[in-house]
Image (spheres, rainbow, N blue to C red):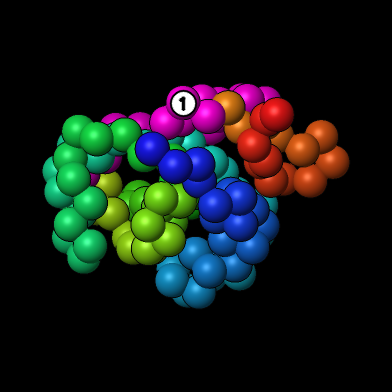
Amino acid sequence: MKEINIKRLEVAQIENKLNILIGTKEVGTAFITILTLSKESPKYKMPAGAPFVAVVKKTADGNLAVFNSLTAKSEIIPSHSFKEPTPVGKTFEFGGHVYQRNPKLNLYTLKK
């Protein structure tokens, strides 16, 4: 599996896109997680049960705005269709690559 495009892990930039999708201006609540869906997503048919790296943000009605870092597609997932996301720590591994958080900015880069 190829590494994730680092631009797809810039939380602040992606949060702006998710805010437009949700229709809010609230800043600072998006985070990176390894998300697992319990049901196939309605719009882009992201598969259930297969974990993927995503930037997520909760909506006011309990749903989840999701930016899939592998496909660069975003959609709103219904509240009953995902396992509760938890933020990743300072580092996370996906697809055999290790990503680490920049200590000053809210973004992740490939660990060398």
Quarter of the image with the N terminus in it: top left
Q: Residue furthest right?
A: 104
Crowd band around label 1 with a 10 angstrom C-alpha radius: few (<14), some (14–19), many (20+): few
Examine the structure image and report whether residue 28 is included in the region drawn in magenta.
no
Q: Relative to 50, is 58 above or below?
A: below
Residue ID at (69%, 45%): 107
Q: Position of residue 23 (x, y in %)?
A: 47, 74
Q: Relative to 89, is 14 above or below?
A: below
Residue 60 visible? The answer is: no
Residue ID at (43%, 61%): 72
For the residue labelled by badge 1, is the local secondary structure a helix, a strand or a loop? loop
Foreground of the two, 100 or 80: 100
Disc 1: which residue = 96
Residue ID at (17%, 40%): 48
Image side of residue 55 versus residue 106, left or right: left
Image side of residue 5 versus residue 109, left or right: left
Residue ID at (70%, 29%): 112
Residue 100 visible? The answer is: yes
Q: Which residues are magenta?
A: 80-97
Q: Position of residue 41 (x, y in %)?
A: 20, 54
Foreground of the two, 37 or 53: 53
Number of labels in the image equals 1
Examine the structure image and report whether residue 90 is included in the region drawn in magenta.
yes
Q: Main structural element of the magenta stretch: helix, strand or loop?
A: loop
Q: Position of residue 79 (x, y in %)?
A: 26, 47
Looking at the picture, which amino acid does disc 1 mark? Gly
Q: Quadrant of residue 44?
A: bottom left
